[in-house]
Every structure is written in structure tokens, then in C-alpha cells.
Amino acid sequence: MAIRLATPNDLPALCALLDQLFAQEAEFCPDRAAQTRGLAAIIADPRVGEILVAVENGRVQAMVNLLYTVSTALGARVALLEDMVVDTEARGGGLGSALLEAAIAHAEQRGCGRITLLTDGDNQAAQRFYRRHGFQSSSMLPMRRAL
């Protein structure tokens, strides 16, 4: 297994993984055109973010996005971890843990002082997974407004 940055050639595989992720999330639905635009924008500009992929047997098996901004509270760059997904057929073998640890190390190398993520409130398995990797619940409440 190798972990590397995504390239434009990975877009079809990344969209397929997002189809799996969004099928289980309450707030999102798969939309290939929208996902392709978003993924391409991240890949094209590393200042916006970076996508790490886990490749096994020549096939992208997992992905995670790191999106970057600056925290005024920390006075430093921070990352928003999004779209962490392992192909359903590749789960249970430690691939997700390896990818998440690589993403954490990558964010640290990029000078990030914090990683924040969102997960569905009823997704207990994901919450246990992230807690095992040092993430903690926050008292901050996420709020959204569509524009």
C-alpha cells in the first residue's frame, strides 16, 4: 500500500469513493459534476488543500481531503479534514488508520496547528475511529447556511 497526493487522473476513483461516502451521510447526496469540480479545484491549488489517497494493487482504495485556512485563535494555519472514506471492500484491514495517520503527519508538516473534522452525529463507528486517533468532541456547534 502506498499513500500519495491525488492527481487529476484520480478524479474518477475519487468520485466513486465519494458516492459511497455520500450515500451514508444524512446531509449530502452524490453529484458527480459537483464532486468533480470540487476535487479538481483542490488538486489544482495546494494552497486550498490537498487530497491524500491510499493505493493498493494499482487502485485508489481510500481518500481524505485536507483543506487549509488560518485560525486567528492559534495565529497559525489549520486544516479541515473532509471526505475520509475507505472503499467498502477494503475496510477492516487498517487502511483507514494508516491514511488518517498520514494525513495528520502531512498537516503537521504543512505547519497546521489543529485539524477539525465533522462526522454525522449518529455515526458512532466513525466517532470511535476518530477518538482512537486522538480526536475529541468539541463544545462548538457546527452551523450552516446554504448560499
Image (cartoon, rainbow, N blue to C red):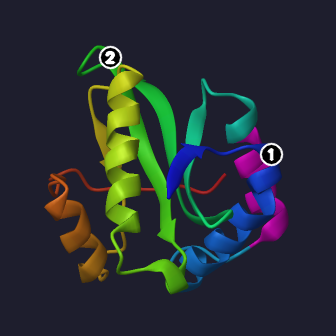
Q: Position of residue 123 (x, y in %)?
A: 31, 80
* In the rendered image, the vertical position of residue 107 relative to residue 141, given as above or below: above
Q: Give residue 8's mark.
A: 1
Magenta span: predominant SS is helix
Magenta-span inclusion, residue 56: no
* In the rendered image, the vertical position of residue 40 relative to residue 55, given as above or below: above
> What residue is pinned by disc 2?
76
Q: Position of residue 47 (x, y in %)?
A: 60, 23
Out of 67 and 100, give the one closest to the viewer: 100
Which region shows up in magenta?
A: 31-41
Q: Position of residue 120 (x, y in %)?
A: 36, 74
Q: CA distance from mark 2 to mark 1?
A: 29 Å
- Badge 1 crowding class, 10 Å Cα cut-off, few under 14, some 14 to 19, many 20 or more, is some
- Badge 2 crowding class, 10 Å Cα cut-off, few under 14, some 14 to 19, many 20 or more, is few
Q: Position of residue 73 (x, y in %)?
A: 24, 22
Q: Residue furthest top?
A: 75
Q: Is residue 74 visible?
A: yes
* In the rendered image, the vertical position of residue 64 relative to residue 27, given as above or below: above
Position of 80 with respect to 27 (left or right) is left
Out of 24 and 73, give the one closest to the viewer: 24
Residue found at x 19% / y 53%:
135
Q: Is residue 71 visible?
A: no
Q: Quadrant of residue 92?
A: bottom left
Q: Quadrant of residue 137?
A: bottom left
Amino acid type, mark 1? Pro
Position of 76 with respect to 9 (left or right) is left
Amino acid type, mark 2? Ala
